[in-house]
Image (cartoon, rainbow, N blue to C red):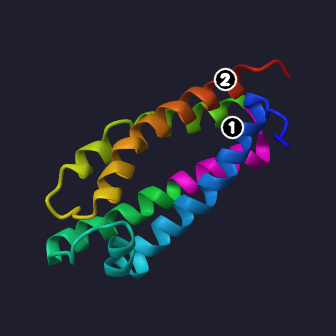
Amino acid sequence: MLAPAMDPTTLVRLTNRGMIAFDLALGTGAILAPDATLRVIGHAPPSDDARALFRRCGPIWLTFAAAHLVAAVRDEPQDWWAVAWLRGTELFTDGLWAGSPAIRAPHARAALRLAGAFNLALAAGAGAVARRPR
């Protein structure tokens, strides 16, 4: 039996909750265990400068987690616009990273390339939630 279709607003809200956990894990891992986190996402053992750059991104991802959390809790249009804007800033970053010779796993390259489409969909969805009638 097929599950009933989920309305788009509910899908965006569920995805937003998942992004709280994802960005929290990614940001925390980047800061506290950069080598292990990079290994999980398909990166070769990092050089010292790659490790430092990845660790520097940890607070960025924690900021994303906070923005997703605020949108989920307060549910105000300006919070959803912030999520849309943040996701929009990530449209091309993962695709660029997929081109790195340090990303060796084919599934990791594919996932990084698809991340741009995911971020576009979430940015559009968050914008739609922001515009919904209250």
Percent x, y of residue 78: 66, 31
Vertical order, 109 against 8 (above or below)? below
Span of residues in magenta: 64-76
x%, y% of residue 91? 38, 36
Q: On the rendered structure, is 8 left or right of 125? A: right
Q: Are marks 1 and 2 in contact (CB under 8 Å)?
A: yes
Identify the mark nearer the N-term, 1 or 2: 1
Q: Is residue 104 visible?
A: yes
- On the rendered structure, is 38 left or right of 118? left
In which quadrant will I find the N terminus? Answer: top right
Foreground residue among 64 and 22: 22
Q: Quadrant of residue 125?
A: top right
Residue shown at 44% from the left, 35% from the top: 117
Percent position (x, y) of residue 73?
78, 49
Crowd band around label 2 with a 10 angstrom C-alpha radius: few (<14), some (14–19), many (20+): some
Is residue 133 in the magenta section?
Answer: no
Q: Estimate the spatial distance between the alpha carbons at disc 1 and disc 2, rounded to whole Å.
A: 9 Å
Residue where numbered disc 1 is placed: 12
| Three-letter amino acid code at the position of disc 2 | Ala
Quadrant housing the C terminus:
top right
Q: Evaluate whether residue 90 shows in this view.
A: no
Residue type at numbered disc 1: Val
Eyeballing the image, is 32 above or below 129?
below
Q: Residue at x 43, y 63 (%)?
A: 59
The residue labelled by disc 2 is 128
What residue appears at the point 34 percent right and 49 percent down from the top-left corner?
A: 110
